Image: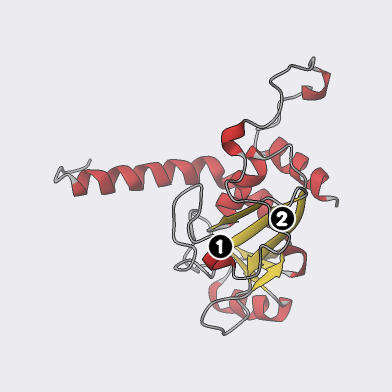
Amino acid sequence: MKRRDLLKLSLAASGLLATGAEAQPACATDGTPTQFIPKKAADPRPAENDLEKFPKCPYCGMDRRQFHHSRMLLQYSDDLPDGVCSLHCAAISLAVNVDREPKTIWVADNASSAEIKPLLVVDQATFLVGSRIRPVMSRRSKVAYGSEAAARVAMAETGGELANFDQALLAAYTDMSQDVAMIRKSREERRQRAAGRPHG
């Protein structure tokens, strides 16, 4: 499936793509708002030293080195890069940059035993969705492996189902509403604790 077709399918499934949008008249302000443009300069090789180049997720602020095992990196056709912490935030990047064609998308390889998980192109990854592995920015775990065999070993130990990137991305959009509500609640509780107020 072509990447643009996948993106349209995912946005439609999550209710972000309005029915009959192509039939609407063009407007001078159509297009992705400027504030959603990835903030880093164009980079033809963004995967080189990605943790140094993109230390924080631009959508949630999480430390990508701390969450190196779930991090992702998107490179759009104009070479603008977007380094994010998780599939959840990668889905946000793809949605708000809908006018940009994804050129390459990388994800951390949990089949590797390296201290910092290396990146691999998502089309080479097998995802384990819904396992007991601790999720990142989501209620439902979504973990990428560089080999199907490694994903099957993890599945035997922790449950879940195998998926390709298209299926894992669709799961991320499906989970988005509940995940955002969970994140909002968690952050509000942290703010109240920091202010010394009980939460309820």
Direction left: furthest residue: 196
Task: Determine which residue is flagged by label 1.
Answer: 53
Q: Is residue 148 above or below residue 184?
A: below
Amino acid type, callout 1: Lys
Amino acid type, callout 2: Gln
Q: Residue at x 70, y 38 (%)?
A: 11
Is residue 84 at all visible to an observer of this figure? yes
In the figure, residue 113 lies in which quadrant? bottom right
Q: Is residue 193 above or below residue 116?
A: above
Is residue 92 left or right of 25 when viewed as pictured? left
Image location of residue 47, percent across then percent down:
66, 66
User: What label does residue 167 carry, if any?
Assistant: 2
User: In front: 10, or 100?
Assistant: 100
| Dot 2: element | helix
Cα–Cα span, label 2 and label 1? 29 Å
Counting other residues with Cα less than 10 Å from the Cα at mark 2, is it few (<14), some (14-19), or many (20 or more)?
A: some
Q: Give the quarter of the figure containing the C terminus.
A: top left
User: In front: 165, or 57?
Assistant: 57
Direction front: furthest residue: 41
| Dot 1: element | helix
Is residue 185 left or right of 112 when viewed as pictured? left
Name the front one of labels 2 and 1: 1
Is residue 9 left or right of 94 when viewed as pictured? right
